[in-house]
Image: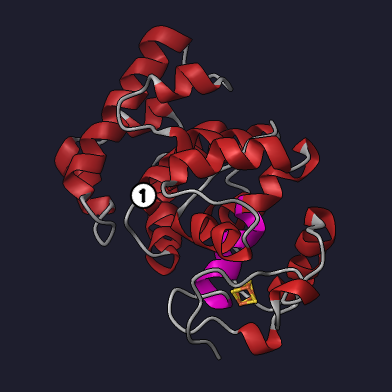
Amino acid sequence: MNEVQKKPFDINGMLNRIAELMVQYPKAAMFQLYEEGFTSLFEQLLSCIISIRTLDEVSIPVSKRLFAKARTPQELLKLSPLELEDVLHGSSYNGQKAYTMLSIAQTVIGQYNGQLPADYEQLTSLKGVGPKCANLVLGIAAQIPAISVDSHVHRVVNRWGYIQTAQPEKTLSALEKLVPQDRWIDINRLLMPFGKFHCTHNLPKCSICPVLDYCRQVGVTRHR
Ligand code: SF4
């Protein structure tokens, strides 16, 4: 489609169309786990750590294996580092993640009376917790408006031509200026699976895309 034929961006309308499309695809891991009852900030944070550099297809069963043994900081600290590493088997860097989780559990008990705070600064001050996980956890478990940017979100919104950013960190601040707060959680909830299954890294499905009339297809040279 020619550039001049594209519509002005309507982020609400675009997200609504993508929501209809994504009904047929699996939900992102943390949203799926939330629906299955793993709703606490602590559980969501553990799931996010498990998901780092790990496919959702692995993150979900590994998270459930962990929650069968420990769902609170107190329960987690009953596991030795080696036991926890074994439970996390399949998730990338499981040994390192085991130490990270135990360190977080100790901090939560020692500094926060056993309750993980729903606060961005305090979450990102924990060892091993970056902006992506902090914002996902706050959005999903505490319903605090927050945008979480992963590689899929970063790629999709730049392809649209909605923003022009080189790094995901810049994408976060650019989206915060453009997207209404009541859709912030939807950005990751919808665009992560949209990028994984539809607007894929190689050969995006432009010919059957529900937002083709808005998308400038920046950098797309081949598509399905
Ligand atoms: Fe992605 Fe193509 Fe759809 Fe644009 S038109 S969002 S590049 S699949």
- Looking at the rendering, the quadrant in which ligand 1 lies is bottom right
Q: From the viewer's side, name the closer residue of 122 and 42.
A: 122
Side of 33 relative to 184 (left or right): left
Residue 66 appears anywhere in the view: yes
Q: From the viewer's side, name the closer residue of 101 and 224.
A: 224
Quarter of the image with the N terminus in it: bottom right
Above or below residue 173? Residue 127 is above
> According to the image, label 1 marks what residue?
50
Magenta segment range?
188-198
- At 78% from the left and 63% from the top, the residue drawn is 14
Q: Quadrant of residue 189?
A: bottom right
Side of 168 relative to 208 (left or right): left
Residue 76: give x, y in percent of width and height. Answer: 35, 33
Quarter of the image with the C terminus in it: bottom right
Above or below residue 83? Residue 120 is above
User: Label 1 sits on what residue type?
Assistant: Ile
Residue at disc 1, secondary structure? helix
Residue 200: give x, y in percent of width and height. Answer: 50, 75
Within 10 angstroms of label 1, few (less than 14), some, or many (20 or more) residues?
many
| Main secondary-structure element of the magenta-colored stretch | helix
Side of 185 relative to 20 (left or right): left
Side of 53 relative to 124 (left or right): left
